Image: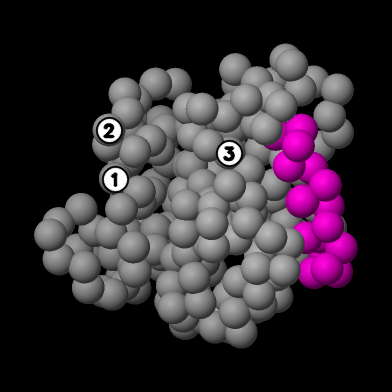
Amino acid sequence: MDQILIVTGHYGCGKTSFAVSAALEKRRQGEAVTLIDLDIVNPYFRSADFKDELEREGVRVIAPAYAGSNLDLPVLSAAVDAAILDGGWVILDVGGDDAGAVALGRYADKLRQRPHAFLYLLNGCRYLTDTPESCVCSLREIEQASRLRVHGLINNTNLGPETTAELVRASLPFAERTAELAGLPLWGTAVMPSLQEPLSDLQGVIPLRRLVLPPWTERRE
């Protein structure tokens, strides 16, 4: 079934990595996939930065007109409207706070016309969202700004390349408590390939291919 996946969360939660990974996975399943970069607020770690790699894999990428330049202006293409209504899988990487979610709100009416899943990623290692209460506060602000309701949570607690299986395990009560406070289901825990075997006993593991790394680290699959 054609579907729209909306990925949001506070800065540093790993939403761009998740969105890119989801787009590649759907493409490998033979789906037509469009990845829309709606992160018009934060100029770093955008899906648009990986446009060439994604398009080599057959993923169409739509980004603000000035993405990848030294200008950071909220210019959005009419192609976004068309992609949302045309069919196929569409994945939206949304800005990391309520201001970023305003861009999503522009498309709220059109999004309601198609089946969609709106996911909030949480990372308990980020200082602005290191408590369940702060995560829920961020989530509600994004809902209000986007005029859409979040459907579920993804636990993406990580420390980048320093993430360990122990860290992921220790984050589960945090994620479960956040879901309880938000009154939303916890859809799963995103896990890098290197940790999937030691965490194979966990329920709801979501394999994650990380292409998005800080510029001071070496990119690796």
Q: Is residue 1 above or below residue 73?
A: above
Q: CA distance from mark 2 to mark 1?
A: 15 Å
Is residue 170 rendered magenta in the image? yes
Between disc 1 and disc 3, the foreground one is 3
Question: In this orientation, which residue lies closer to the viewer: 108 or 88?
Answer: 108
Q: Is residue 216 above or below residue 73?
A: above
The image quarter in which residue 66 lies: bottom left
What residue span does the magenta drawing correspond to?
168-184
Q: CA distance from mark 3 to mark 2?
A: 17 Å
State whether residue 19 appears in this view: no
**Closer to the N terminus: mark 2 or mark 1?**
1
Q: CA distance from mark 1 to mark 3?
A: 21 Å
Question: In this orientation, which residue lies closer to the viewer: 162 or 118?
Answer: 162
Determine the secondary structure under disc 1: helix
Give residue 21's position: percent from left, percent from top.
53, 37
Name the amino acid, label 3.
Answer: Asn
Give residue 157's position: percent from left, percent from top.
63, 43
**Closer to the N terminus: mark 1 or mark 3?**
1
Residue at mark 1: 49
Give residue 207's position: percent from left, percent from top.
65, 30
Residue at mark 2: 216
State whether residue 74 appears in this view: yes
Q: Residue at x 14, y 57 (%)?
A: 69
Q: Is residue 9 above or below residue 33?
A: below
